[in-house]
Amino acid sequence: MASLAAKILADEQSSATAKRLAGSVLSQATKGHETGSELEDLASRVLNSDKYAEDTKRLAGSVLSQSNKKR
């Protein structure tokens, strides 16, 4: 996922949403980091929408997999 996230961040054509999710994925690569509630909400909306690209949905899934399970 980290390589996909880096590719998204480097691509000028990537959407702001994809870049936010990519940044979160990369920050979670460090042990002990977890997704905040705002990014959890964004990732959930991405996964429930038909308008986002497959790579954006993959990032959203990764973000949610690192979420705080107690929330």
Image (spheres, helix red, strand yellow):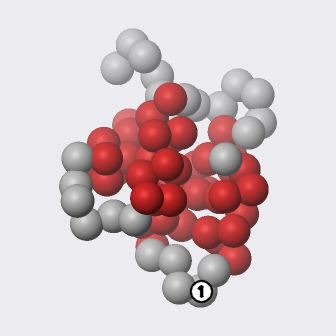
Q: Pick out the residue farthest to the top.
A: 70
The relative height of residue 36 versus residue 10 in the rendered view (above or below) is: above
Residue at position x 48%, y 65% in the image: 18
Q: Give the total number of marks visible in the rendering.
A: 1
* Image: 56 above or below 9: above
71 displayed left or right of 34: left
**Badge 1: how crowded within 10 Å, few (<14), some, or many (20+)?**
few
Question: SS at mark 1?
Answer: loop
Image location of residue 51, percent across then percent down: 25, 66
The reply to whether residue 36 is in sight is no
- Front-lying residue, 54 or 11: 54
Looking at the image, which residue is at 66% across and 39% down? Answer: 28
The residue to which callout 1 is attached is 12
Give the amino acid type for the residue marked by disc 1 in the picture.
Glu
Q: Which quarter shows the C terminus?
A: top left
Q: Is residue 65 above or below residue 1?
A: above
Q: Residue 56: where, in percent of width, then height?
A: 46, 59
Is residue 57 among what the camera can see? yes
Image location (x, y in percent) of residue 47 = 31, 47
Q: Residue at x 63, y 80 (%)?
A: 11
Q: In terms of image quadrants, where is residue 52?
A: bottom left
Q: Residue furthest front?
A: 54
Residue that extends furthest to the bottom in the rendered view of this protein: 12
Residue drawn at x 74%, y 56% as measured from the top left: 3
Question: Which of the 4 image quadrants contains residue 17?
Answer: bottom left
Residue 26 spot, x, y in % from top left: 69, 50
